[in-house]
Image (cartoon, helix red, strand yellow):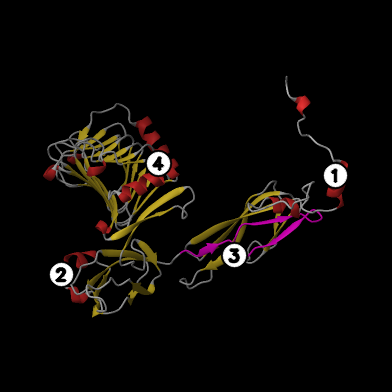
Amino acid sequence: MRVRIVVCISLILCLAGMVRADTQWTAGTNNLWSSTGNWSNGVPNATEKAQFASSEVCIVDFEGAIAKNIAMDGAGAGHLRLVDGAELSVMDWTIVGYSASNVGDMACLLEVLGGVLNCQMRCFVGFQGEGTMIVDGDGIVNILSQDFGVAQEATGTGSVELRGGELNIMSGNLSLRNGVKASIDLSGGILTQQSSQARIDYINAAINDGIITAYGGQGKVIIDTNQIPGRIIVKGVHSLEPTPTDGGNASSGQVELSWVLPDPCQAGQPVSVDVYFTDDLTKLEQFLDPTAIQVVSKANVNSAVVQAQPKTRYYWAVDTYVGSPDDPVFGPIFTFIADNLAPAVNAGKDQLTWLIDGSAGVALDPDVTDDDYPQPYLANWTIVSEPNEGTALLYDANKEDTSVTFSQTGEYVLQLTAFDGEYTGTDTVTINVYNDGCEAAKSLPDFVPIPGDINQDCVVDDLDMAILQEHWLESNALELSDLPL
C-alpha cells in the first residue's frame, strides 16, 4: 500500500503544473472535501496546504484525497472527518490545534471513523492549541515517517482517543513533550510502533504517569511485543474483560458474549447485569427503546449467547448492579465484527537436524484450526528460503502433515498456508541443518562441553587421551627468569 501511495503521489506532483496558493475550507456548498465550492481556491492538491478554520465539518468519503499539509487552526477552529471508503494522503506535516487561540469552543477535531489517513511526515495533535484525534470503527492512521506528537508546545493540549481501528507509527517515535497536557486513551483501538527497549520504557513511563490510559481509567493498558515481530502493540483491556475482544472478530452464527463480574460493594452479595446487543449503534447510544435490544435483564450471569450475521459489526454493553446507590453502573460500548475467521495456523516449533549419509529428514507437525467455515480448508507448504535451490524437497506439499528432506547444511524456512475458500492463514517454521549431531548440539543455547572433551567432538575417548598424553607435564606458566630486570 505505501509503495502504491507514493507512486500515485509522485505522478500527481509531476502533473500538478503551476503551483497554486493554499486553499481554505469554507463549507460553502456542502460538507464534502470533493466539492470545489467548499474551498477558497479549489480542492487541495499535493502542493497545497489545506487550512481548516471553520467549525463546519469537512467529510472525506472517497479515495484519492490529497494535500501538502493539513493545518487545523484559526479563529473558527477546524473539524475534519474520514469515513468508510476514504483515503487521505498528506505529503508533509499534519497539525490538529495549530494556534494558541485554538482553545475551548475553538479547539480542533480530527475524526478517523473509517478509511485511511496517511501522514507522510510528522503529525501533531495539540501543537500550540487544543486538538483531539478520534479513531474509531475501521479507521486507520499511518504516520509513515517522523514522529507522532501529542501536546508539543508549552500551550499545547492534545487528546487521542483510540476507540477502534489503528494508529500506526511506522518508523518515528511517540512524542509526549508537554506530558501534563497530553492524553491517549485506548478503548477498543490499538497503537503500534517499532519495537525497542527505549520505546517500551517510554510508553511504560507514560502509563505510570496516567498519560496513556484504557477506557478512561477503567481498564488496563497492555504492551504486546510478540504479536507482530519487530513492533509494539499497545491496547486497552476493560476491567469487564469482554469476549469477543473489543474491536476484534468473532465467527458468525451463535456467539457467546462473556464478561468478568466486578466485586460487589458488600462482600458476598451477588452482582447482576443488564446486557444490550445490537447491530445499530444509534439504538445503543440513544437508548430510546432499551428493551428491544436487551438480552439479559438484571441477572447474576457472566455470559449470554446471541445470533450474529456474517459481515456485520455488532455493539454491546454490560451494565452492572454492584449494590451502590448509583446502580446500574453503565459500561462502555464494546464492538466486534462477525465474519468467517481466517484459519489459525501454527507451522510447528523451529527444529534442528543433521546430515546422515548426505541427507536429513524432518516430519512436519503443524496445527491448523478452522471451525467456522462450512468447507474444508486447503493446506499448502512452500519453501521460503534455502541455502541453494533444490536442497530441500517436500514429500507432499499439499498435505498438512508431511515431511521434508535436506541435502545441504544451512537454514531453511518453510511456510504453511491454509485457505478456507475466503481467507488465508499462514505461519513459518525454521529448520537448521548441521553436518553432524555434535554441531547440532553446539548450536543449542544451553550447550555445555563435557570436561575432558579436548578436541570438542562431543565425546571423551582415546583421541582426547592421546592429546592429553602428548602434552603431559608441559607448562606455559611464567618463570622468574622471564620477568624483565
Q: Earlier in the sequence, mark 4 or mark 3?
A: 4
Q: Amino acid at mark 2?
A: Asp
Between disc 2 and disc 1, the foreground one is: 1
The reply to whether discs 2 and 1 touch (Cβ–Cβ < 8 Å) is no
Q: CA distance from mark 4 to mark 1?
A: 66 Å
Magenta stretch: residue 386 in it? no
Q: Which mark is residue 366?
A: 3
Indicate which disc, 2 or 1, sits on the residue closer to the N terminus: 2
Residue 467: which numbered mark, if any? Answer: 1
State which mark lies toward you, 3 or 2. 2
CA separation in Å, label 4 and label 3:
37 Å
Q: Amino acid at mark 4?
A: Ile
Three-letter code for the amino acid on which mark 1 is drawn? Ile
Name the secondary structure under disc 2: loop
* Left or right of 283, for residue 346: right
C-alpha span from label 3 to label 2: 52 Å
Q: Position of residue 245 (x, y in %)?
A: 36, 64
